[in-house]
Image (cartoon, helix red, strand yellow):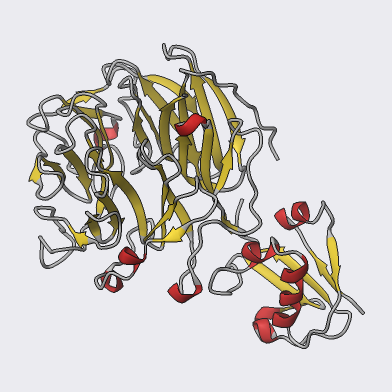
Amino acid sequence: MPLTFVISGPLRELAGNRGEVQVEGRAEKLSDALTLLWGAYPAFRDRVVTERNELRPHLNIFVDGESIRWSGWFDTAVRDGAEIVILPALSGG
Amino acid sequence: MPETKHVDPQSGDVLILVGTMKGAFIFRSDDQRQQWEMGGPYFPGSAVYALAYDGRAGRNRLWAGPQSMHWGPLLRASDDFGREWTNPESSPVKFPESAGAAVANIWQIVPGRDAEADTLYCGVEPAALFVSRDAGETWSLSEGLWNHPQRERWVPGGGGLCLHTILLDPEQPNRIRVAVSTAGMYVTEDGGTTWRPSNQGVRADFLPEKYPEFGQCVHKVVQSRRKPERMFLQNHWGLYRSDDRGESWTDIANGVPSDFGFPIGIHPKDPDCAWIVPLEADVFRCTPEGKLRVYRTRDAGASWQPMTDGLPQEDAYETVLRDAMSVDPHAGVYFGTRSGKVFASIDEGESWTSLADGLPPVVAVKTAVVS
């Protein structure tokens, strides 16, 4: 089953105003899933991670509802058909 | 999101580009500068520390470096005065993997000299210089500055470790001076291959050694186009003039209420004339006595006079940041405050007009005449 990425902010604009995109491929960890995402939507990468391949500090990613902060960051396990949500944090205004 | 208003500048019009913590604005007037109209907000919600106009080689291009708290900084350009902006797939200004760093904010965009119409320079946080030789399509890190052995001892100031000033010598095409908070100034004389610190005579009150080779917190530096030997510098405590292209600096805090401040502007034709906005102290970064006063020198810093006509002189505890003042080619002077006010003077500071009162905190003011 494809992975589903739920997206917001400028990512929607870069995906033709869609709120979610699906990506085919095998991913064991979130880092694998993100590599698939960057392959399908190259413009997402610099918006989500820095040049040091670190998640931008005011973004959150949830894998099947669980924040990756508590499940191993980019090493978080990803199941077949997982839902991955990329959301801005509370900060900003 | 707010509806963005647009302006339609014509050749000869004067622009004031205003960057704020929540977006950018464009003020436009004809060359008489009596009536202004405002466009914006552009990039609502993003901090915009860097703005520039590039009118070389037939262009009418605006540059901006909006920094989204969530989605990061992105260098963007517009060829129609802000109606449409580029939205590049990959961030044009970013560190190579080998640098082990990530751009946190874009602080400065400077078009190259007229003779190098496709060259642009960009200063970022963490402090680094990027150069484009193809009109902004691609950028490369100035490795000579990034790999300078003193860089590991540079430390962030209150605004972060930023490269905030880029001065291209008007007469010596390979000479560039940059300023970093907190590292001081560095100069290249070979177009950017090698760099050396250049802070002789500039004080560092916050260090045990008051006159170190580097490590000063230089807030802003300007250079005369008419007489490039002449430079002025507003320091974190200290007001200076150089008569030798910045090789040495002389204290000129004569008759100012404080030698602490951020911005400094220089007259486009008169190398003896400059403007500053003194602040009370680093522990109270507001205008002294609750009076918003621009100080002007006409004698290269031998004396300074307060310019107050049209500026609030009661309960005005304002802050003007390092890049929030600019001088146009007609010697019009413009500045913005952290409280969102923008003021303009078309008589070299004698009197001031309010252009805006209620913008988000102003962090950048740049001006240009449309080609």
- Give the residue at the far front of this rendering: B115
| In the rendered image, the vertical position of residue A3 relative to residue A46, given as above or below | below
Closer to the camera, B216 or B295? Answer: B216
The residue depicted at 28 percent of the width and 67 percent of the height is B154
* Count of marks overlaid on the render: 0
* x and y percentages locating residue B153 in the rendered image: 26, 72
The answer to whether any part of residue A32 appears in the image is yes
Measuring 45% from the left and 50% from the top, which residue is drawn there? B133
Residue B61 percent coordinates (x, y): 53, 35
Q: Is residue B79 left or right of residue B265?
A: right
Q: Residue furthest right?
A: A1
Residue at (29% x, 48% y) in the render: B284
**Residue B69 in view:** no
* Residue B350: x %, y % from top left: 26, 17
Front residue of this view, candidates B207 and B187: B187
Q: In which quarter of the image is the N terminus of chain B?
A: top right
Q: Where is residue B336 in the image (x, y as percent from the top left)?
A: 41, 33
**Residue B230 relative to residue B152: left or right:** left
Question: Seen in the image, is B208 located left or right of residue B162?
Answer: left
Quarter occupied by residue B116 = top left
